[in-house]
Each structure stands twice: as structure tokens, then as C-alpha cells.
Image (cartoon, helix red, strand yellow):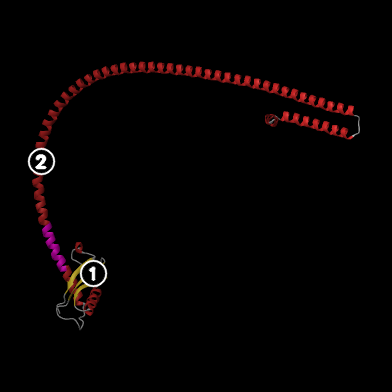
Amino acid sequence: MRALLKEILQNPLAMMYAILVHVVLAAVLFVSLEWTDLPTPAQPEVNIVKAVAVDESKVLAEVEKLKKAEAKKENQEKAKQNKLDKQAREAEAKRKREEKRLAKLRKEREAEKKRQKKQQEKRKAEEKRIAAERAKKKKEVERLKTEQAALEKKRIAEEKRLADAAAKRKMLDEKRRRDAEAAARRAEFEAEQQRMDADNRKRLDSLRGRYIADIQNKVERNWIRPASAKPGSSCKVAVSQIPGGEVVNVTVTQCVGDDVFRRSVEAAVYKASPLPRPSDPALFERQILFNFKPKK
């Protein structure tokens, strides 16, 4: 009974048939119950029961028939599915065989290509070797020709070198003689120039000393001694002037004296502007440095 229920639940069509059978049975029972309530002779009651039994057997027979039809249909579907599965397996096997055949064919083609490529590379290598051998021989011939030409050129160059060396030695000897004479004249000229420069420096130093002394004297003439100045007072004076002797700046440092003395020296320098000009214009300098040490 449980197996029957499981089969019915798994098959919707069988379930429909089962429901139909139960409906028919319920209807038959309902009719039979109604008939049992009526006062009827005993003989018809027997017939009703028999009719009910006959109808139920027919229903069961119909259900069995339907089940067999459903089973037959399922078997046909399974056979059809098995056939389709078999065809699919055969097609897959055929596809794999075809793929294997194509792979084998590709492999053979690749092998043939490699073999042809190898032969071609071998042929090219041989051609390259032959070409290299020919080039080597040609290069060797050219090398020999070049060496012969170089030897000839070297011989000619050596002859020319020897001739040039002889001419050069002669020229060098002449040049040494002229250089010696020129060096003697240059030494004599430089000695004279040094003597003249020394005399000129001595003269300029004398003139410069006189020029600085003239500036010191004019500043001292314009200096007004302050009451705090003591004997021995002195300063270093840096003067900035322009051409013509105009004083533009004065700096007094290292004074031996007080601030009044330092300011008096600055005032004397400004008062002495324009400063005396040097006897030689070459002695003029924009910056003049001298020691101011008054005599009085």
C-alpha cells in the first residue's frame, strides 16, 4: 500500500486517476447508503450490492489499464531517451575521434614545417659558410695587396722622412743660431729695460713721496690745533678724491689723541680740498693714505 501511495505521489497522472477512483467509490457508497435507507424487498438490495461490486471492479480495471498505459508510455520515453543518449555518446565519440585525427594531422604538419625549416636553416647556414669563406679569401687577397701597398708607402715615407729630417736639422741649426743671437739681443734689451724701470720707479717713488708730502703739508696748514691736542698726537688718514683733487670722503683711524683731535684732522683735510696735484699724472690715485703727525 505504501509503495502504491509513493508511486501515486511521484506520478501526477496516477494521482489524478486515484482521485477519480475515490470519487467514483464515494458516489457508489453514497447511492448504496441511500438505497439501504428505503424499505425495499430483499432481492433488489442484493442486486444493488452486486452492482456496486461490479462498478468498483470496473473502476479498478480501468485504473489498472491506465497504469499500464502510463507504464508503457514511460517505457517508450525511456527507450527514446536511451536512444538519444546513445546517439549523443556516439556523436561525442565521433567528435573526439575527429579532434584526435585533426590533432594528429596538425602535429604531422608542424613536424613537416619544422623539418622544412631545419633544412632551410641548414641550407642558409651552408650558403652563409660558403659566402664567409669567399669573403675571407677575398679579404686575405685585399690584405696582402694592402700590406704590399703599405710597405711601398712606408718605404717612400721613410725616404721622405730622412730627407725631411736632414732639412729639419739644417733648419734647426739655423734657427738655434738665430735664436741665440735674438736671446742675446733680448737679454741686453731686458737688462736695459730693467735699468730704465728701476730708474723710473725710483723717480716715481721720489715724486710720490713729494706728492704725499705736499698733501700732508697742505692739510697741516689748514689744521687748527685743538686745546686738547698733545705733542706726539698722530692719525692715519684715508682720503677719497676725484680727478682735480676734490675731496669726497675722509676716514681718520688709529689716532693717538682724543675725538676732538680726530675731528680737527678731518676738518683740515676737507678744508685743504682741492688737494695738490702730482707732478706726474701717472701718480694720481683716488685713494690716498698718509700719516698725519703735526710738527707744531
Instruction: Check residue 201 for magenta coloring.
Output: yes
Residue 128, picture quadrant: top left
Residue 225 numbered tag: none
Residue 295, picture quadrant: bottom left
Front position in the image: 199 or 235? 235
- Vertically, is 274 above or below 9? below
**Residue where numbered disc 1 is placed:** 239
Q: Residue furthest front?
A: 42
- Vertically, is 277 above or below 8? below
Q: Which residue is rendered at x = 37% and y = 18% of the image?
A: 121
Question: Is 40 positioned to the left or the right of 241 in the image?
Answer: right
Residue 129, picture quadrant: top left
Q: Is the magenta stretch mostly helix, strand or loop?
A: helix
Front position in the image: 35 or 174? 35
Disc 2/disc 1 C-alpha distance (Å): 54 Å
> Which element carries disc 1, helix, strand or loop?
strand
**Residue where numbered disc 2 is placed:** 178
Question: Is 42 positioned to the left or the right of 203 in the image?
Answer: right
Front position in the image: 244 or 288? 288
- Quadrant into which the N terminus falls: top right
Q: Which residue is rendered at x = 89% and y = 29% of the image?
A: 42
Three-letter code, disc 1: Val
Three-letter code, disc 2: Arg
- Give the x, y percent position of residue 64: 74, 24
